[in-house]
Image (cartoon, rainbow, N blue to C red):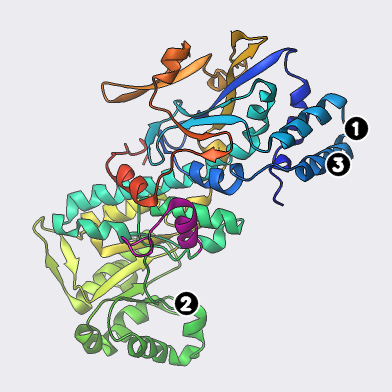
Amino acid sequence: MNNILLQTDVYKMGHMEQYAPGCNKVYSYLTARSDKNFDETVFFGLQYYIKRYLSEPITPEMGEEFLTYRKMILGSNSEEIEVKIRALCQLGYLPIEIKAVEEGTIMPVRNVLMTITNTHPDFYWVVGFMESLLLKLWYTITVATCSRQYREIVSRFFNETDEEAMTPAKDFHVHDFGYRGDASEEGAAISGVAHLLSFLGSDNVPALPCAVEYYNADLNGEPILLSVPASEHSVMCSFGREDEISAFRHMLELYPTGIVSIVSDTFDVYKVLTDFAEVFKDDILKRDGKVVFRPDSGNPEYIICGNPEAEPGSNEWKGAIRLLDEKFGSSLNNKGYKVLNPKVGLIYGDGMYLERYVRTLERLKEMGYAASNLVIGVGGILRNHSRDTLGFAIKATYVEVNGEPREIEKDPVTDHKKKSHKGLLSLQKVDDKYITKDQCNVAEEADSLLQVVYKDGHLVKETSLSEIRKLVKAQELVLVADI
């Protein structure tokens, strides 16, 4: 489906005839209203939607298709709707202006992120009509925000337990395994790019061409997305349960240098970390690179750090980190924490929710191990959200009727958290804090941190993945209070 006029909700199909007679302007804004899960957001995804959808010409054929579908759904089309849709198609583009914060801006909730208004008085209704599509930004923003939370956790524990020289490694400590867990190809690609704002590690291939096409990522420039050779359970099983050790030998022979990740819990992770590790110890120590063991099932905290309720001294009680330490050794960094032999590592790729990840890193710290010993993979967790996670909404706050300004607001008596701002808006930074000022005059609205990004069918301010990454990393995101 390539008809932007059909990328809306049914009730939007009739709003063009429902506004107050004489309406000639509508002004709306995007905001995240809820701090239930996160108290700040990472703004990301607008350029994708502009390039992918809003920059395409609107043709008469699109208008006729819209009218056909609308009649099938609602039973009839009024003359006013037919005239207005055909006029838009004759114009050939979306006569709206979008202002927004820079992509990569970390913004406290309940502030304006973006505004939309019409540039031609006949097309006031287009502002509300585009709400359904533009509100899809909730997804890219929420994934970018969640990924950023993981980044802050990594930074916190690295700062506490790792040497400064390990800082570059933070880019690889939360790896995107989420392609298969997304609901669509498009969603997987753009959410994959959202993760790349905070990390380099990813197995999400569609994120790479998406970053190149929509965010000007340079294939010949700085790294965009990096990963390593890795096995899966079918690979290990193909050698037979009784000959799993040959699967490990095969992986080591295939990849004699560099980092290689080997899934280790197809049958018995503790056997792998003890018996197999002993068999291949010399080979691993002689390799020019690192062998990463990947447990992938069970309670992550217990598998990595040991189950305190297990028999003292047992493999289950020790956990993967101590078993690898016993086999390959470790050294103390300048902060007094153990770092495993650089020839081996650990990655855990299942069920690492933010809270569980924090608990696991806290356990490692209590045991005297640096956070850099553990890499995690996240997939569905990054994407297990809805529009309600941050309470995203686009609401109109200002209209003009026959040229007369009217400041409007939503304020339900049953839920005052849904109260909207009122009038024209301006985003300001006062004492290093973002503030949304409402009920502005035209001059105040123009004097805002929001910048024109799209106007009359064209992207007018373009950015790149590199620029967004720099902005994200230059800002500090406060950790969620309940983590």
SS assignment at label 1 = loop
Q: Dividing the picture into quarters, in which one does residue 58 lie?
A: top right
Residue at image coords 77%, 41%: 60
Amino acid beneath label 1:
Ser
**Label 2 crowd (10 A; few <14 / some 14-19 / many >=20):** few
For image coordinates 33% across by 49% down, the residue present is 151
**Residue 289 appears at what percent x and percent y?**
24, 78
Q: Position of residue 441 (x, y in %)?
A: 47, 10
Q: Which mark is residue 232?
A: 2
- Compared across the picture, whether 170 is left or right of 84 comes to left
Depth check, front residue: 327 or 47: 47
In this view of the protein, can residue 470 be seen by the observer? yes
Range drawn in magenta: 206-224
Extreme residue toward the front, this view: 90
According to the picture, the residue beneath numbered tag 3 turns out to be 68
Report the residue marked by disc 1. Answer: 76
